[in-house]
Image (tube, rainbow, N blue to C red):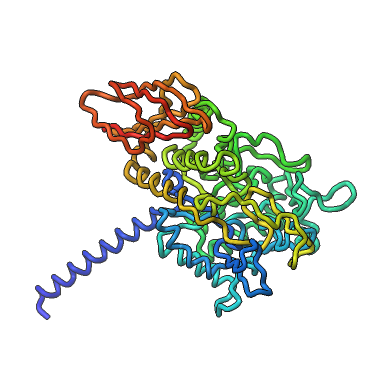
Amino acid sequence: MSLKKIFILTCLFLFQSVIVFAQENVENKSDLRELFQNNKAVIYSINLRTFNANDKNGNGIIDFYEGETPGSFINAIDRLDELKKLEINTIHLLPITPVGKIKALGTAGSLYALADFHSVNLQLVDAQSDLSPKEQAKKFIDECHNRGIKVIVDLPSCGAYDLYINRPDLFVLSEDGSPFIPADWMDVRLFKISDKPTELLSSDIFVLHKIFVNYMINIGVDGIRADVATLKPYIFWKELISYARSKKEGLLFLAEASESWTKPASDKAFFTDYKKLLEAGFDGYYGDFFELKNWKKMKNLSDSIINRQKILNKYSDKKSVIGSFETHDEVSPLLIGGENFSKIIIWLNATLPLNPYYVDGFLQADDYMYEYSNKKANETYTDDEFYYVHQGQIDIFNFSRKPGTDSKILIDEHVLAMRLRNSYLDVITKGSFVPLKSDNERIFAFQRIYKDKSIVVIINRNLINSENVNIKVKKISKKSKINFIKDIDSGKLVKSTYTAKMRPASIVIFSIN
C-alpha cells in the first residue's frame, strides 16, 4: 500500500472518529435532566398494571379465570409507538416495586404500598416470557429508549404492612406499639427517620433507598420521582441524590411537593418544604397547577407563574415544574368541567413555562368512574375482598381495565397543541411570561416573548357563559406579521388591542413576528 493511500485512510479514520465522538457528546448531553430543566420533557404517567390490560368481557376487571391479562412490562411495549406519535418523550412509571397484600386496599394492592426495595412487582411480569423479571423491566426501558422516550420511576414514600412484618425496626411505632399510619393512608406505615444526620445516613432505611437507586439505574431508568418527598429530611435527599448522580450523571429527581403543602402528613412525620427539596438537589416539583379548578381569575394563574419563576431563578442549577393540572391523585378534569376544561388544560400545558404532564387515560377522555367500585370481589389477591377505588381517579388498587375510551377529541386537541409547541419551541421554553392587561378578569390572557417572536394565548376560563373582553397586546408594530393559529372566536386585533366576545371555554392563540 502506498504512503498516499495510507495517509488518505488515516484521515478518513480520524474524520469518522471525530464524528462518532461528536455524536457521543450530543447523546450524553441529551439526558432527561437537561430536557426537564429546559421545559422540553413531555411526560406521560402510566400504571403498568393497567396500561395495556386486556379486559375481554368489558366489566372493567381483569378476570384471570377467563384468560384476561393485566398490563405487563412486555405487552406495554406494544403501546410505545402510540405514545411516540403523541410527541411523548418521557414516561413516568407509577411504582413498579412489589406491593403489600396484608391490610391492603383493593384486590391487587396499592402501587404505593412498598413491600420490597430491591426487585420489581411480579404482577407486571409476563409469565410466558423467557426473560427474568429484571430483564423484562430492562427490556421495556430499552424499548422506550429505542424510540427516544426517557423513563422516570416512582419511589414510594411509605412501607406496606408486609414489610413491617419482616422489618419492624424500619417503622415508627404508635403509643400502643403498632406501626404508625400516616394521615389516612390505611394500607401503608411510616418509615422511621432519625433526626441525627450521622445516624440517619448509616441507617438501614437509607441503605435500602440506595439499593433502590442502584436497582433502577441497573435497569436503565433516567429519573426518579419521589412520592411525598416532604416526608424525608433535607440531608436524606441531599446525600441520596448525590449518591445517585455519582452512579449515573444526569439522573433526574422530581419531588412530589407543592407550594400549597405547608404541614407534615402527621405529627410523627418530617416535613421538608419544596424550597429545601430543591436545595437538596431535586430538579423540580409539582407546583400548584391542580388548583386550576379553583382559579377563576387571571390573577390566580399569573401570580402562580410569576412567583414560582422568581423562586426557581434563585438556584444556581436550573429547576422547573410539571404541568400537574391532573395527576393520579386528582379527580378527572372531565368530572370537573368536561371536555372544555380538559382542552384548557391541554393548551396551558403546551404554552406555559413548564413540562407538559398527562395521566394515562386523560387524552382518551376517561373519567375513571369504575362500575365495580367498592363492590365485593369475585376474586382477590390480597386480604381485601372488595374492589377499592378512588372514584374519578385512575385505579391503582386492582387488576383493572386499560384507561381510556374510543373518543379522539382530546387526542386531536393535544396533537394541535403539540404542533404549536414544536413550531414555537424557543418562545415557549425560553421566552418570558407576560400577563396581558385586560378589562375582564375571567379571561386568561398572557404572552410568551422570545427575541423578535411571541405568541399570545387568550382563554375564556368561564365554562358556562360568553365573555366580552379587550386585551392590550405587547410588541406589535406596523411591520409585525400576525398569524392566528387557533381562532375559535371572531375577534378583532386593531393596532395593539384584541377585542372579542368569547364563547365559553374558547381559546384564541396567535403569533407575532
445 versus 168 height, above or below: above
What x and y, as percent, mark residue 128? 58, 78
Viewer-proximal residue among 422 and 343 = 343
Q: Residue at x 37, y 43 (%)?
A: 421
View extreme (top): residue: 439
Q: Is residue 443 left or right of residue 5?
A: right
The quadrant of the image that shows the C terminus is top left
The quadrant of the image that shows the N terminus is bottom left
What x and y, as percent, mark residue 220? 50, 63
301 versus 285 height, above or below: above
Viewer-proximal residue among 16 and 411 = 411
Viewer-proximal residue among 59 and 143 = 59
Q: Residue at x 72, y 45 (%)?
A: 196
Q: Is residue 236 visible?
A: no
Q: Is residue 25 visible?
A: yes
Viewer-proximal residue among 511 and 494 = 494
What x and y, as percent, mark residue 228? 65, 46
What x and y, as percent, mark residue 448? 37, 33
View extreme (right): residue: 176
Residue 15 occupies quadrant: bottom left
145 versus 479 height, above or below: below
Residue 500 occupies quadrant: top left
Q: Residue at x 52, y 39 (%)?
A: 341
